[in-house]
Amino acid sequence: MQSKESMLKIAERTFNSRLFTGTGKFSSAAVMEEAFLASGSELVTVALKRVDVKKQDQDDFVVRLKYPHIHLLPNTSGVRNAKEAVFAAQLAREALETNWIKLEIHPDPKYLMPDPIETLKATEELSKMGFIVLPYIHADPVLCKRLEDAGTAAVMPLGSPIGSNKGLKTIDFLEIIISQSHVPVIVDAGIGSPSDAAWAMEIGADAVLVNTAIAVSQNPVLMAQAFKLAVESGRMAFEARLASPVNYAVASSPLTSFLDE
Amino acid sequence: MQSKESMLKIAERTFNSRLFTGTGKFSSAAVMEEAFLASGSELVTVALKRVDVKKQDQDDFVVRLKYPHIHLLPNTSGVRNAKEAVFAAQLAREALETNWIKLEIHPDPKYLMPDPIETLKATEELSKMGFIVLPYIHADPVLCKRLEDAGTAAVMPLGSPIGSNKGLKTIDFLEIIISQSHVPVIVDAGIGSPSDAAWAMEIGADAVLVNTAIAVSQNPVLMAQAFKLAVESGRMAFEARLASPVNYAVASSPLTSFLDE
Amino acid sequence: MQSKESMLKIAERTFNSRLFTGTGKFSSAAVMEEAFLASGSELVTVALKRVDVKKQDQDDFVVRLKYPHIHLLPNTSGVRNAKEAVFAAQLAREALETNWIKLEIHPDPKYLMPDPIETLKATEELSKMGFIVLPYIHADPVLCKRLEDAGTAAVMPLGSPIGSNKGLKTIDFLEIIISQSHVPVIVDAGIGSPSDAAWAMEIGADAVLVNTAIAVSQNPVLMAQAFKLAVESGRMAFEARLASPVNYAVASSPLTSFLDE
Amino acid sequence: MQSKESMLKIAERTFNSRLFTGTGKFSSAAVMEEAFLASGSELVTVALKRVDVKKQDQDDFVVRLKYPHIHLLPNTSGVRNAKEAVFAAQLAREALETNWIKLEIHPDPKYLMPDPIETLKATEELSKMGFIVLPYIHADPVLCKRLEDAGTAAVMPLGSPIGSNKGLKTIDFLEIIISQSHVPVIVDAGIGSPSDAAWAMEIGADAVLVNTAIAVSQNPVLMAQAFKLAVESGRMAFEARLASPVNYAVASSPLTSFLDE
């Protein structure tokens, strides 16, 4: 459907879908599987806890992800610093046979806000070790540039705190990040509705990652489909260029003079 | 695709599409036609000025709308009071052979804000005369209930001033209106982007009317398609029920304990 | 302190304070009295229920308001239409010996949104009868102009639903109302914090009415003082003209070149 | 006026005023001086460029600040990394005889967003050297905690980009920072109006720094006074506890039954 140039590319991989998903909070593995298929997503992040590092008895959630079009993105959720993150990335590479890693380093157990210092350090190390690193970070424009210098494959700034469903509270900073970035910008946390996802795409985000809003919906499969359409819609709007808000109303229906004729 | 029960019904007519459009501000009639086809819209509002009331030499914009799936909704844009609106509705009925009328009564030429008093009066009169009335109004919950009593077929509260592209500035009042309404609620003005349209649908609007944001886009056809997907997406999300925002972050990726094992 | 020209004038009365208050929801009459003195308010609205229409045994809340600088503004809260409002205004005039009346006509008991049609009708009648009418209304620019034509002494558009503390959800419409009005504009409902009150004054509102946010605070007297300062602050900022938001940062500390010298 | 316990304390210094200011963008040194006196501010930040490091021929802007109640806070605006910042802090200490330093490290000349990595590094070094460090940072909750560990005297998260007047775009993150901080939280950039300043104080910020909004106002002296009142108001409201927003309107004027009596 879309032209090759307009497809998202991270490292050497291209993606037809700009909607990334995650395995958390689903009521069952079967529902999750069906939702992912409805979403069209080609990148699914999975916590290392889900992964049998000895490769013998995989979690049903991981087994359900064995589709050729779905690329697994292990994440380091739960680690508190760069050292633990590097160790976790190595475990994940062993277990899942991928050198892609989503960095999540959040020392704070309440709001799960990411640590900028440790994230940069881990990105530097992991990039040197040949990993494709996608770090979850605060919407900090300068940090994004430093991560680029450190070899990151993409940046994943948050919209609002993880799991909060509060939407794009960082919109002013996401716009700065997008305007300056040389790597894909993936809005990662807080997206609570398809309209949030569409908005992120409209301002030029390269992709969004949505997990909670799909998983805890009353109908995750339908909601996954809703997000699929929203992301496509937002991307189209970005390409078609939105008009700017104006302060004075200008009627789309011209004032008629028929009454005076 | 969608079940009969979930389809929008206004008066005796059912609609597959919940995206309504208008003919204003397009650069050419050909672009407008292509955009409408891409939008999937089945209801298009047209200013009376476009209409040749003597039926001899129709405006090219009107001729382009002759598709069986497109229902014309003449509007009274330009009238200043109920009396002029009733006269305009009668002209429109003659010219376009429809008893549907979108009431737009705005005495103020700068912001084009609707007049609640004259709109109610005209709705009462036109309903008695057998018209299917869709009034454009401020997002005023009490006025909406009074229009219901007066026989309105739907209510069309504004999101923000016409043509402003400012989005859903009236969201708190739209939610009250939707929770109380017994007739379809169509969000009418100010929708500037697909994410706005999706948001209106997510909170339970029955449809949205979008004109300026499509017409003045750099690529109206692609933008029309973007709005089509956004409206479908928002409706799905409404049906699948969104989760509520929460104040504390709850990670979708559970905190792993693998490091301590 | 302030020059005569900059003082608020409604009908023939001038006000030193642009903070109006109300008697609802206070835990005791004594706390209310102290809060009003701290607020500096010179206009206090009181529900007719509080008033002994036979003038024999006044409610303690009304007795507490007998200060020369405090002008009572009876309101019609509880009436459902213009007829009841006119009757209530007459009762209030008898009981409180004032021809000032705050019109509140809200048929809806849940959100207490005002009725535009009945409010206009009552304003017309009461103005003719010599009342000084201050109508509580939705932030509807056209309605405000019609109320002017009907002889209203001021307009009192809402910021958000009464008692919701949601702040200025109608800001875009308040700005239009203020830019067009020839009578004082008093923002009436929903103001939940001093910052809301300051904001309303900054955009040019002539006054604000605050009740719930003061009355239900843990310290109503201190909160009343906070609102007093906020209203004064917002008015000063309006007179000193705020700068406009800009999209590019411009440092207030100039980039130094001292390092290169 | 205020009790000792409620006064702001940074390092060993207490402040009567929670409004901090800066010397940038004023049209003249005389206007600046008058504005500062009207503001009541006791902490004024000054760019090193303004300072004659050889102490011979001080800039008129610095000379104007010689009041016993005004404490100078030199800032490092213009430096690009920790090394330059440390050098600048030492220069400032020489020139102005203060060990207080406001760290501003922004490698990006367009948006002047702060660098989290270099700021932490400089804070560590300068704290060890005996400086009282006040770092300007993004509203990043984890970074704030790390700065605490590094010995910072306060944190200065931004509300929106410097000089943008966009207000508190980071409010959700400021609330997290305030709830977790053991050092004073001073909201530093983007405050465009007194209502913004009041809002920051209402949520519990310890102080705000305002420069551009005062300096570029049409009447900087009056605007300085407006900010003074707003900061006092917001602090009072914080101490008096605001009520929470509610979804259903609850009238402050009780529904009267007088009509049915």
Image (cartoon, coloured by chain):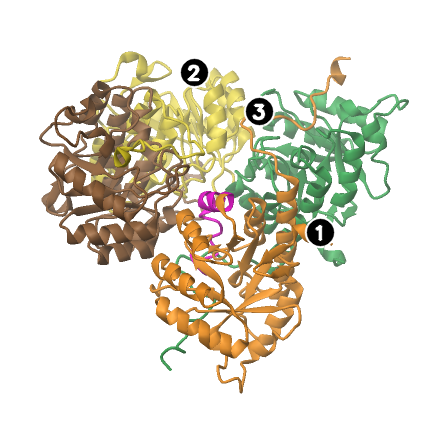
Chain colours: A yellow, B brown, C orange, D green
Q: Is residue C205 above or below residue C76?
A: above
Label drawn at residue D61: none
Which amino acid, by three-letter code, is at mark 3? Tyr
- Answer yes or no: are tags 2 and 1 on the same subunit: no
Q: Are marks 2 and 1 in contact (CB under 8 Å)?
A: no
- Answer yes or no: are tags 3 and 1 on the same subunit: no
Q: Secondary structure at mark 1?
A: loop
- Horizontal side of B182 relative to D201 (left or right) equals left
Q: Is residue A58 above or below residue D199?
A: above
State how far apart marks 3 and 1 are (Cα).
41 Å
Which one is in front, A132 or A229?
A: A229
Which amino acid, by three-letter code, is at mark 1? Ser
Q: Secondary structure at mark 2?
A: loop
- Answer yes or no: are tags 2 and 3 on the same subunit: no
Q: Is residue A156 magenta?
A: no
**Residue for point 79% across, 39% down:** D34
Mark 1 sits on what residue? C3
Mark 2 sits on what residue? A130
- Horizontal side of A2 relative to D31 (left or right) equals left
State how far apart marks 2 and 1 are (Cα).
72 Å
Residue range corresponding to the magenta coloring = C161-179
Q: Nearer the viewer, mark 2 or mark 3?
A: 3
State how far apart marks 2 and 3 are (Cα).
33 Å
**Residue for point 88% across, 21% down:** D54
Mark 3 sits on what residue? D111
Read off the chain for label 1: C
